[in-house]
Image (cartoon, grey):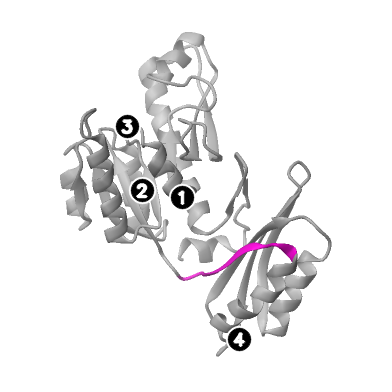
Amino acid sequence: MTHHVLTVACPSRRGIVAAISTCLAERGCNITDSAQYDDPLTGRFFMRTTFVAETGSDIAALRQDFVAVAAPFGMDWAIHDGSHRMRVLLMVSNFGHCLNDLLYRWRIGALPIDIVGVVSNHLTYQKVVVNHDIPFHLIKVTRDNKPQAEAQLMAVVEETGAELVVLARYMQVLSDAICQRMSGRIINIHHSFLPSFKGANPYKQAYERGVKLIGATAHYVTADLDEGPIIEQDTVRVTHAQSPEDYVSLGRDVEAQVLARAIHAHIHHRVFLNGNRTVVFPASPGSYASERMG
């Protein structure tokens, strides 16, 4: 049986869970996992429910019936096919640790996505990408041609049907227009534990400040540089005896792990935008294996 994922976001009020569970039960669906959060700050309610339908059940009809359930609550909702592999476009510049990590996870099935292409402003990783039988798109970006370069990028997005764009250490700032057009569909990995040590060479800044923890942050891209809603973060402990080069090496490992976890959460519809924040439901122990295999 195919798993489906119902995602719901709406103003908080009594009866939401009862209405959803009743609708699913009456239409021959069995809930296998459910998580919800009622945010007291925003008054918003978020819910992610995984369910299986009886053999022969009509999901299109369920979607149509659910409209009547959602309307009184003002729900922003969707029913996703759990077997669907999200189409993802990767972007990279001259640092390849995140790209290589994602390609490996994709190749062994740990990240169930379809990589529809890799865009870069350099040729550094062309051979690596082509050797994986993935289309490589060179789009050079200069101060003078940025509008044309972004038009090329959006053409690739449209042609490939990319549902998610991942900036795997892509070192170019995207325009406000693209950020708004692709809102909630671009994930960036920042080589710092935001909001500290922004800008160039954050590991050197951290070293000079004698920090004891360094980290990385994966977030959605917005028009405000490195200020988008945070999806995932992690840190690694360092000591006074380590060099800036050690910081870089450890930091890159954390970056790769954080980015992969953020993508994993997004493709399984566990991330909900909540203003400038996110609600991220963890993968339950019983559901991780099925999520891993798609």
| Label 3 crowd (10 A; few <14 / some 14-19 / many >=20) | some
Image coords of residue 47 (percent x, y):
68, 59
Task: Return the disc, 4 or 1, that comes first in the chain's sequence.
Answer: 4
Q: Which residue is mark 2?
A: 102
| Label 4 crowd (10 A; few <14 / some 14-19 / many >=20) | few
| Label annotation for residue 171 | 3
Label 4 vs label 2, nearer the camera: 4
Helix, strand or loop status at disc 3? loop
Name which residue type carries label 4: Glu
Image coords of residue 72 (percent x, y):
75, 68
Helix, strand or loop status at disc 2? helix
Helix, strand or loop status at disc 4? loop
The magenta segment: 73-83
Name which residue type carries label 3: Met
Q: Report, in whole angstroms, how far the alpha carbon at label 2 lies from the one at label 3.
A: 17 Å
Task: Return the disc, 4 or 2, that comes first in the chain's sequence.
Answer: 4
Q: Quadrant of residue 251?
A: top left
Q: Report, in whole angstroms, how far the alpha carbon at label 2 lies from the one at label 1.
A: 10 Å
Contact? badges 2 and 3 (CB < 8 Å) = no
Q: Which residue is mark 1?
A: 263
Question: Is 78 rendered above or below residue 65?
Answer: above
Question: Is 21 rendered above or below residue 250?
Answer: below
Q: Which residue is mark 4?
A: 54
Task: Return the disc, 3 or 4, that comes first in the chain's sequence.
Answer: 4
Label 3 vs label 4, nearer the camera: 3
Q: Report, in whole angstroms, how far the alpha carbon at label 4 lies from the one at label 2.
A: 35 Å
Identify the residue shown where x is 32% and y is 48%: 90
Label 1 vs label 3, nearer the camera: 3
